[in-house]
Amino acid sequence: MGSVPTGPETPQVEVTPKTGLSSRERVVDNGSRRCDDTGVLLRFPSPHTFEERNRALLDDPRALPPADLLLWRQGRDELARRALEGQQEASRRRTPRVDAVYPAFLAGYGGVFTVDLGFEGVSLRVCAGTRLRRAEPASVRLKVGNQSIYLSGRVAWGSDDRVGLQVEQVHPADEQVLQAAVCKRLLEVLQPGSGGRALMGRRAGD
């Protein structure tokens, strides 16, 4: 089965290859790709269909056929749109952010945990006194289910025990796992009666 077009080619950068994967990685996009970038008429998948594809992607992002991946992208975009339309203008983000705890390893500092995740960044709980300066390069490995994903970027903000990382470079498969983890949480918090309490607004300097 041939791949379905997904829009203009994304710029490529050379980075250290991830074991067992292509040596080509791309600069992280600014959130989810709009569905109309495909140039074809699209129908959003049902919630059940999207949840199945999202679960499969978290299990193994390389095993999802192109047609299923396209369905997942459509559902991702629609879910992100729903999450963002309820935000206050003052705290509006370009992509959704949710609270979620995963084990992680911050290069140069050791084991940490995530506090929240977004399509474009993560915040981490670090040891008190771990001071990273704003705009300083940083890399983190997250353990999401059975997958280890690698994110590189720069510090967006920091406090005594937390640091926010703006993702700039990520392997495409790792980016999909990150976004699927966000979508998994969105599916939970956007259920009727949840009140969306896990949705995160913008913080100063974020």
Image (cartoon, rainbow, N blue to C red):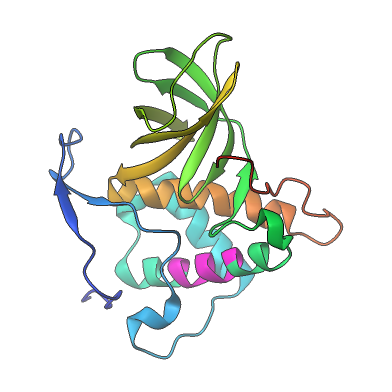
Image point 66% across, 68% down: which residue? 82
Quarter of the image with the N terminus in it: bottom left
In the rendered image of this protein, does residue 152 appear above or below residue 94?
above
3 left or right of 157 in image: left
Q: Position of residue 164 (x, y in %)?
A: 51, 33
Quarter of the image with the C terminus in it: top right
Q: Residue furthest bottom?
A: 41
Camera-side residue of 122 and 146: 122
In the rendered image of this protein, does residue 145 appear above or below residue 160?
below
Image point 48% across, 73% down: which residue? 74
Q: Position of residue 46 (x, y in %)?
A: 60, 75
* Quarter holding residue 128: top right
Image point 39% across, 71% down: which residue? 70
- Asked whether residue 75 is drawn in magenta, I would say yes
Camera-side residue of 106 and 68: 106
Q: Residue furthest right?
A: 193
Start and end of the magenta stretch?
72-80
Q: Is residue 148 visible?
A: no
Q: Position of residue 175 (x, y in %)?
A: 37, 49
- Asked whether residue 189 is drawn in magenta, I would say no
Image point 57% across, 60% down: which residue? 51
Count every numbered label the image shows and give the total: 0
Q: Position of residue 189 (x, y in %)?
A: 73, 52
Q: Is residue 92 visible?
A: yes
Camera-side residue of 160 and 51: 160
Q: Main secondary structure of the magenta part?
A: helix
